[in-house]
Image (cartoon, rainbow, N blue to C red):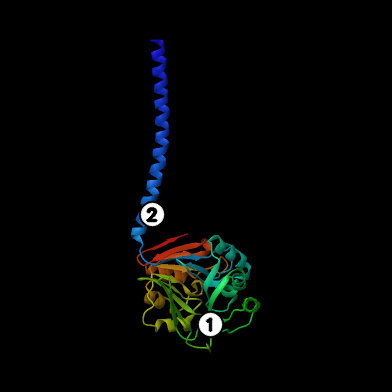
Amino acid sequence: MQIRKMIGLFMALMLLAGCGRNIENTASLNTETEVETQTDQTASISTGPSVTITGFSAETDEAYDAFVIVGENHVTVIDTGLDENGEELVSLMKEQGISKVDNLIITHFDKDHVGGADHVINAFDIGTIYTTYKSKDSDQIDNYLAALSSKGLTETLVTDEISFEMDGVSYDIYPPQSTAYEKDPSNNSSLVIMVSCGDNNMLFAGDAEKLRISELLEMEDIQAEILKVPHHGRYEKNMAALVEKVSPEYAIITSGTIEPEDAEVMQILEAAGVTTYLNREGNITITMSSDNISITQ
């Protein structure tokens, strides 16, 4: 009897130990199933082409523009921030596994848009470079031109509207309508870019000021779900008309702590029901597909 009791106790202990292993395995299996389900749900939500757009945020008090757009098999960079941010921008891009920039777009040649361009050009293989005309001289422009020369690259000066498609993502680049603006010639020479996935669009308005905004208001269709607000959120008298014309759901403002967005612009966006993100509060990640938009910060 004693032996039978000992055998029974031993068998019970073995059964408990086995149950413990089954619980762990079941938990593991459930986790794997959960991940697969989430992946399937994501796939069902987003179909067709998509891009991930990162609005770069560096540790600086100044305002600047730098956006990295990653498609299925291509990378587009729109503006490159300040020279002092250049290496940080390059590091961010390398962390995303980027080795080649298919399209580099410099909207205009202020230091807060072209400043990091030489760092990007030196660090990556570069495809096509789209630019507006130069209405000024600066050390940042000289560094950019030197980087072009060292890599044997040339610019494509955009004087007429240019459209192209990569991985099902459409890019439309709209040039300025004048080469002799009386006021703010550098900002008003900004290229404006529409990035489209199916019915969803993001409009990058560079540093357009009043005269350039007036040109945009004359265009037939610049509606977009996301607006990169021009000129770091500085107020212009026709800003409300631009917001009404574009009719965005979301806005991105590239402002700095010592160069904050104007309160009037925030009021215009709020009155229009637009959800607004400020890149000085951290990197902004936009995932845009033909049927879905998600934004995190």
- Foreground residue among 86 and 49: 49
Q: Residue at x 33, y 59 (%)?
A: 44
Furthest residue to the left? 44
Question: Disc 2 or 1, which lies upstream in sequence?
Answer: 2
From the viewer's perspective, is residue 206 above or below residue 279? below
Residue at horizontal 39%, vertical 67%? 49
Q: Quadrant of the N terminus?
A: top left
* Image coords of residue 263 (percent x, y): 47, 69
Count up the numbered dots. Answer: 2
Q: Is residue 272 left or right of residue 154?
A: left
Q: SS for tag 2?
A: helix
Pointer 2 and pointer 1: residues touching (CB < 8 Å)?
no
Taking 185 as reference, is 203 left or right? left
Residue 181, given in percent of the width and then of the height, sits at 52, 87
Question: Front-most of 97 and 82?
Answer: 97
Name the residue rendered at 42%, 41% in the picture.
Answer: 28
Q: Position of residue 29 (x, y in %)?
A: 39, 42
Dot 1: what SS?
strand
Asked if residue 138 lies left or right of residue 168, the reply is: right
Q: Which residue is mark 2?
A: 39
Q: Residues within 10 Å of mark 2 (few under 14, many from 20)?
A: few
Residue type at mark 1 is Thr
Q: Amino acid at mark 2?
A: Thr
Q: Splitting the image into 4 quarters, where does residue 5 fall? A: top left
> Whole-Å distance between the Cαs marked 2 and 1?
40 Å
Residue 214 visible to an observer of this rendering: no
Quarter-wise, where is residue 30 in the image?
top left
Residue 1 appears in the rendering: yes
Nearer the observer, 276 or 287 = 287
- Percent x, y of residue 176: 48, 84
Query: Front-most of 32 and 194?
Result: 32
Q: Which residue is mark 1?
A: 156
